[in-house]
Amino acid sequence: IAGRFKGDVHVQGDLTIELGAKLNGGVRARKVTIAGELEGNIESAQRVELLTSGVMVGDIKAETVTVAAGSRMKGQVEFGSSDKSSAKPEA
């Protein structure tokens, strides 16, 4: 995304929000890279990268999250495989 967009974005592959771009809406993608602004939640991503110029307002649920120095975020982050946290040890 290189401009302004309002609405949810669901893609099978990767999504990049370019520097100067703004997205207002929820995101579902394999990999999300934020150089611009995202106001909305990210769900079910394998990888989220918040670059130095990136601004995120919303919650993130992903397997891996990378946050660069200088980026800004307001929201909650949940990362790691959910299967590991819910697995019960066998006796």
Image (tube, rainbow, N blue to C red):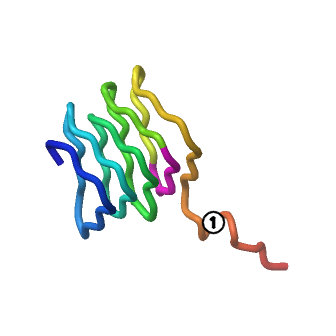
Query: Magenta includes 61?
Result: yes
Picture coordinates of residue 55, whole percent (x, y): 38, 33
Magenta region? 58-64
Picture coordinates of residue 81, whole percent (x, y): 55, 62
Q: Is residue 83 left or right of residue 71?
A: right
Relative depth, front residue between 11 and 88 = 11
Dominant secondary structure, magenta: strand
Q: Is residue 15 left or right of residue 52?
A: left
Relative depth, front residue between 3 and 65 = 3
Q: Tell which residue pokes out farthest to the bottom in this image.
A: 91
Q: In this view, does 41 lie to the left or right of 4?
A: right
Within-10-Å neighbours for mark 1: few <14, some 14–19, many 20+: few
Q: Name the residue under label 1.
A: 84
89 up-or-down from 56: above or below? below
Picture coordinates of residue 23, whole percent (x, y): 29, 47
Q: Identify the amino acid type marked 1.
A: Lys
